[in-house]
């Protein structure tokens, strides 16, 4: 029975890594679609979302099957519960990549409008947090998971800075640039939410390893924007 | 053992109802803080968030304790898993109420600026969805849960309409109104996300009752904004 449980958990691990890899790839494509004003690439991300949704449902069903069949305890139980939660975060990151791609499609035709925010830095920071949270998951690296949690404030700060810049830009914007500017502003908010979900994943990894619920530990967790 | 399990589940139910009631109350206060330009009320919602966070952690710990202690199967297992998930949605709705309250604080001093969107209708619709999703949870009402899921598109549509109105308003806005207008626009996005979380709760109730995963069932689930 224990051998079967381990075999099922090993299979589940592979499914999680496969979803995580796919979600990270879609995030990178969405970011590139904005940077390169590439509407075709954006479309690819949008169309590909159904694949992520299916993988999420498969992982959830696998977790429920393992719980019902093996009634795991201790470490194994904690592992399954953590996967159930971070599975949801991975799917949401996939949705946010789609949201970014939808806006990339709109701004793709506005080649003359530069991105008025420090979009590259923000997308890099969010991308690093995502990558590190996934690495902490794959390698069960507690140190790395804590590092991701500590970075969340930085991206929150960037988001607030972009809100001010947006207000500034919109004041002097040409009539026809107002809508694409709103889309670019919303992209910065999606990026911040991706960083939030990466933080959630890192928190789940911390729980997975230590059994400690790490949410709401700092003041910033209570009051920062979702 | 079975009697103890039932007793623990009954206690868990009470905890969930208590959190749900609190979250709904905070949502109503945040909405009222915007409508009445009441900065004191907004502050109350912001300060009260720690209480919601604590209740969420307590419920999660209770779920994990029940899983480890009783190793429930079938209906009971499904109940615990559903609670683990919707617990998270409840806490996020609490966060979004805080986000709305933070913006209510900013716009409270701008009495001369009318809310340029149909904010009342949108907050009513989101509030109804939240109320109905919580009723479907408390009464295990499958019919009501399906109805909540069917309403999600309507709020999505309102959000898109508000984005167009925002672009329109910002074009003709006075310099000093640009920032409060951005805050009001972001409130409409928070409302739409509250409706999303209400839909998630209804989906969890459907799973709780039927064992069927109801997510990603319609095209709108794949491609709508988070």
Image: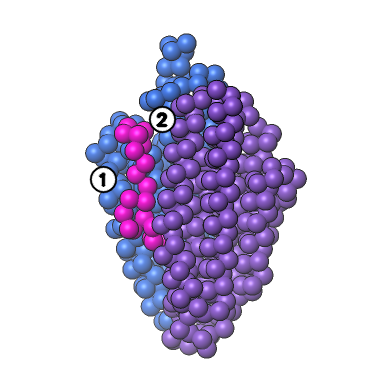
Chain colours: A purple, B blue
**Which numbered marker is on residue B147?**
1
Residue sitting at 48 percent across and 43 percent down? Answer: A59
Position of the N terminus of chain A, as image quadrant, is top right
Give the letter of the chain under mark 2.
B
Where residue B195 appears, as percent x and y from the top left, is 37, 51
Where residue B202 appears, as percent x and y from the top left, is 35, 42
Please identify the residue farthest to the left as the structure is shown.
Answer: B143
Judge whether residue A198 can be spotted in this image.
Answer: yes
Q: Secondary structure at mark 1?
A: helix
Tell me the crowding category of disc 1: few under 14, some 14 to 19, or many 20 or more residues within 10 angstroms, Cα based.
some
Residue sitting at 57 percent across and 33 percent down? Answer: A7
Residue sitting at 41 percent across and 57 percent down? Answer: A50
**Residue B30 or residue A32, whichever sits in front:** A32
The residue singled out by tag 2 in the image is B78
- Whether callout 1 and callout 2 share a subunit is answered yes
**Which quadrant of the figure has residue B191?**
bottom left
The answer to whether residue B19 is above or below residue B215 is above
The answer to whether residue B149 is above or below residue A190 is above
């Amino acid at each position: 029975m224990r051998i079967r449980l381990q075999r099922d958990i090993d299979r589940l691990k592979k499914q999680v890594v496969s979803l995580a890899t796919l979600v990270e790839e879609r995030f990178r494509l969405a970011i590139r679609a904005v940077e390169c004003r590439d509407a075709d690439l954006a479309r690819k991300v949008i169309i590909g979302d159904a694949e992520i949704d299916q993988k999420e449902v498969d992982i959830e069903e696998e977790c429920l099957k393992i719980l019902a069949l093996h009634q795991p305890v201790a470490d194994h139980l904690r592992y399954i519960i953590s996967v159930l939660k971070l599975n949801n975060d991975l799917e949401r990151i996939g949705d946010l990549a789609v949201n970014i791609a939808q806006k990339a499609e709109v701004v793709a035709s506005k080649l003359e409008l530069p991105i008025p925010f420090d979009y590259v830095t923000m997308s890099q920071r969010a991308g690093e947090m995502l990558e590190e949270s996934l690495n902490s998951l794959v390698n069960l690296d507690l140190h790395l998971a804590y590092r991701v949690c500590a970075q969340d404030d930085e991206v929150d700060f960037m988001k607030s800075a972009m809100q001010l810049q947006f207000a500034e830009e919109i004041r002097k914007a040409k009539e026809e640039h107002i809508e694409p500017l709103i889309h670019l502003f919303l992209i910065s908010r999606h990026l911040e939410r991706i960083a939030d979900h990466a933080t959630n994943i890192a928190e789940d990894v911390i729980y997975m390893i230590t059994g400690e619920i790490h949410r709401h530990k700092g003041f910033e967790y209570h009051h920062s924007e979702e």
